């Protein structure tokens, strides 16, 4: 595991206000790690609604299957998250472990097991010993607190080098509502879903179906627009919980309700902030790379091309080497399989046009571009000249540290 | 550039017999490299037929477009290949450079420019100065020799650490025919096409359309089943030239001609051998990885899943770290998007079953598997239990050396 904090970590960490109806605690259950917290319990007051989007993997983890099955009721009383073991590809044992974890939590809290939501992150294929949750669950439930987001974000880390939190406020009608979110990365990150785990909490009063609609809409340009290595976790989970305790908040039934306009923006800001932090903490990352593709035949086509660039090992290693190797960008555009015309293609690094209409830009000054490449944040733009489709994705560079982290992770 | 020869290089290098009607020479044109050959001229006797398959990139190089346009006649008198510059994304200058190269060669040899075939490999986006070919073309044409395949394979190398040659013989009717091939890799290798450059020569008498059919058929399980990093070159080229000078060889008009049975096998052997050498010389490769997927719903589905595994940075880094991290194989199966059922999935490393029916194999001995992982050749098998689809692909591990090679390549 990486020990040094990513050089791309945010310099400012926000204060995270309490959300009425949400309390949290963390503990050391000794799942895998020693001397650090590895389990998070979040308790929700009765009336809390829930929504979730999950990995598109055909081999999802047991907790993902558990959450999917229990989302139907739309009600949540608790969330239990552990790090160190993903409880994925663990067969019947894995299903039994989710049931046991939910039973332990439900009994402690006094609710139904299907009101407990679960997430696990860490090694795949090792059985999760859920009996380890039993000794800590009561003390967790006894010690919950409302201002605990930083600690919560730390407890769910695996190869992350810093905890990820974000917050925003908005008005729904005249009521002020708050959104707080936490997330963890930091490898095996690819779209649909692009995070391993993220949990968002609000005191707004929003029905479960409306919450689901908001989450699906919010994830497209945020978590689904981030990739570290193109690999998709079996455990990717983004869940949102709404307690409805914000004073005077009108009850919202539909995601299309016009009263949600400001809330949608605030939710987007929180999700975008967390997603960017995931990219900033990509395994071994030394450069944050923002890729904008415009002039594609559609937004969807722009997304595919942007992801082809973002996932290209040759583009990512070139940027790690601070080399403005735009030829590899051409390669990545070409291999995306989307409509593109070499002779209309232009490419910018850090705002400097390096290629124009199918060839090197006549005014291309390599020294200036080299200076851009030394910065920790690299802006890469591609104009296709085909149509009006546009998209933006975030990624990071591919470094020797990525290889080291992932070659040594399990051993 | 890497200097040490790949530890996976073949220990045996075959003698390469001359092909009647093919003569070659190499020279130092100083395109990019100093103190090494960087241009290859192959001359073909009149009557030689030609076929080619090329990159699927939407941004192909100028030489690829040149070859595609000139394949129609089916006739070839010469092949000019340079390393050091790909003449890709070079706009009008690039097209002019291909025309100039062909004109210089045609004038020297005394044939039409459209009987000259071209390939370039190296940096993308830098103009290729084709005038550099003029001073060396006449001496190249004067010095051609029939037993020159090793030197030819060396002249087309870029980051390759060893020249790649392969040969086989077959009977067509009563005639003995010979096939000789050369190839170069070694990064930006992905299927459709999986090689950057490969050229195959035979003295069989096969029409251009039949040759095209043979090449398309032969590439599927060979070059298209190899991936280094999932990146597709703008220059991928596989061409085949048939001189028809083998004594007593019947003239073959159709690829479906039953007389071609042995020839097809021999061609497959040559292409498979060259493709494996490309994988063995993957940039920074320390492990050759053979991936077999069986029990998929179709062969095509098996290919997609095998490629998802082969291109997963997390699988490749784990193998670089000699870690039998089969959980990441599950991840890669899951992200492929193809029909799979976690609870029917089994995985083997080096013939040892590590996972069975959706969970760790009860008899899984990590020490034994660890010993397998220390070998230079890793055999990885996945059984899906869904149907009868099967496929096999080759790749290599992802090492710190890959990052170093590709971070420093252009600078």
Image (tube, coloured by chain):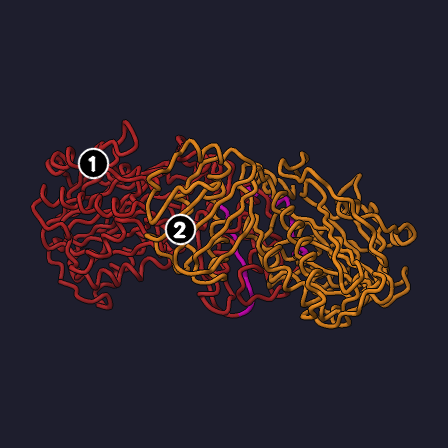
Chain colours: A orange, B red
Q: Nearer the viewer, mark 2 or mark 1?
A: 2
> Which span is picked out in magenta?
B360-386
Left or right, residue A84 beside residue A375: right
Q: Which mark is residue A313?
A: none
Q: Horizontally, is A102 left or right of B95 in the view?
A: right
The chain containing the residue under callout 1 comes to B
Determine if the magenta segment contains residue B364.
Answer: yes
The disc, 2 or 1, on the residue closer to the chain's N-terminal end is 1
**Which chain does tag 2 point to?**
B
Split into 4 quadrants, where in the image is the C terminus of chain B?
top left
Mark 1 lies on a secondary structure that is strand
User: Of the numbered discs in the image, which one, if any, rests on residue B26?
Assistant: 1
Name the image quarter holding residue B192. Answer: bottom left
Residue in the image at 69% along x and 62% along y:
A64
Of residue B183 and residue B13, the one placed in the foreground of this image is B183
Residue A103 seen: no
- Picture quadrant where residue A247 is located: bottom right
Q: Which residue is mark 2?
A: B232
Q: Is residue B293 above or below residue B401?
A: below
SS assignment at label 2: loop
Q: Residue at x 51, y 48 (%)?
A: A291
């Amino acid at each position: 595991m990486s020990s040094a904090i990513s050089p791309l970590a945010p310099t400012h960490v926000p204060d995270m206000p309490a959300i009425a109806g949400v309390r949290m605690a963390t503990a050391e259950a000794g799942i895998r790690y020693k001397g650090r917290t590895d389990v998070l319990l979040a308790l929700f007051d009765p009336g809390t609604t829930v929504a979730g989007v999950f990995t598109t993997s055909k081999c999802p983890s047991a907790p993902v299957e558990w959450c999917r099955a229990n989302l139907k009721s739309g009600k949540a009383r608790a969330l239990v998250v552990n790090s160190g073991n993903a409880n994925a590809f663990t067969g019947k044992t894995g299903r039994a472990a989710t049931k046991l974890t939910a039973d332990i939590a439900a009994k402690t809290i006094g609710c139904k097991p299907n009101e407990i939501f679960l997430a696990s992150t860490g090694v795949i294929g090792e059985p999760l010993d859920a009996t380890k949750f039993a000794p800590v669950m009561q003390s967790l439930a006894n010690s919950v607190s409302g201002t605990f987001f930083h600690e919560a974000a730390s407890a769910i880390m695996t190869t992350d080098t810093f905890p990820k939190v974000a917050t925003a406020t908005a008005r729904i009608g005249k009521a002020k509502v708050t959104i707080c979110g936490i997330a963890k990365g930091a490898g095996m990150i690819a779209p649909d879903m692009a995070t391993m785990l993220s949990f968002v909490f609000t005191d707004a009063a929003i029905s479960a179906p409306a919450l689901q609609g908001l989450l699906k809409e919010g994830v497209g340009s945020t978590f689904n627009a981030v990739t570290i290595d193109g690999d998709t976790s079996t455990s990717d989970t983004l869940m949102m919980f709404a307690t409805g305790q914000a004073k005077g908040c009108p009850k919202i039934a539909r995601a299309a309700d016009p009263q949600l306009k400001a809330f949608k923006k605030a939710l987007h800001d929180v999700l975008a902030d967390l997603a960017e932090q995931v990219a900033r903490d990509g395994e071994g990352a030394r450069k944050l790379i923002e890729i904008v593709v415009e002039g594609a035949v559609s937004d969807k086509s722009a997304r595919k091309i942007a992801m082809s660039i973002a996932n290209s090992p040759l583009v990512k290693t070139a940027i790690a080497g601070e080399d403005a190797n735009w030829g590899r960008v051409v390669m990545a555009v070409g291999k995306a399989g989307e409509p593109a015309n070499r002779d209309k293609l232009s490419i910018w690094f850090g705002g400097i046009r390096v290629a124009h209409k199918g060839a090197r830009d006549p005014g291309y000054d390599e020294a200036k571009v080299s200076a851009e490449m030394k910065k920790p944040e690299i802006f890469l733009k591609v104009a296709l000249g085909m149509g009006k489709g546009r998209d933006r994705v975030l990624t990071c560079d591919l470094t020797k540290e990525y290889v080291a982290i992932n070659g040594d992770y399990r051993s």
